[in-house]
Image (cartoon, helix red, strand yellow):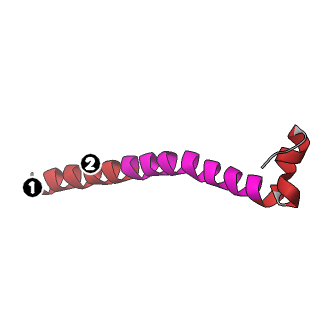
Amino acid sequence: MNWESPAAFFAMGGYGLYVWGSFGVCALLMIAEPILASKRRKDILRSLRRERIAENLDQQ
């Protein structure tokens, strides 16, 4: 496809909002997922440490 200007390219024949909105949502999710996975990992490790400490205290 040939566009006569950058504005026409970004408009995408009237579907630009949907196209660029989809790209934006995808980019946001690709940024958020590793951050959320890292947070979940830290929470799980913290929980396991607490359980180990509690078990050690129970054994003493």
User: What secondary structure is marked by label 1?
Assistant: helix
The CA distance from mark 2 to mark 1 is 15 Å
Residue 26 percent location from the top left of the image: 62, 54
Q: Which residue is drawn at 26% across and 48% down?
A: 49
Residue beneath disc 1: 59
Verify whether residue 24 appears in magenta.
yes
Q: Is residue 14 left or right of residue 21?
A: right
Which residue occupies 17% across, 51% down?
A: 57
Q: Position of residue 7 (x, y in %)?
A: 90, 42
Task: Provide the residue span drawn in magenta.
Answer: 19-42
Q: Circle 2 sits on which residue?
A: 49
Task: Assess disc 1: are there few (<14), some (14-19) or many (≥20) residues with their C-alpha within 10 Å of its C-alpha.
Answer: few
Q: What residue type is labelled 1?
A: Gln
State which tag comes first along the sequence, 2 or 1: 2
In the rendered image, the residue lying farthest to the front is 2
Q: Quadrant of residue 2?
A: top right
**Magenta stretch containing residue 20, yes or no?**
yes
**Would you say the magenta stretch is mainly helix, strand or loop?**
helix
**Residue 12's mark?**
none
Q: Where is residue 32 in the image (x, y as percent from the top left)?
A: 56, 49
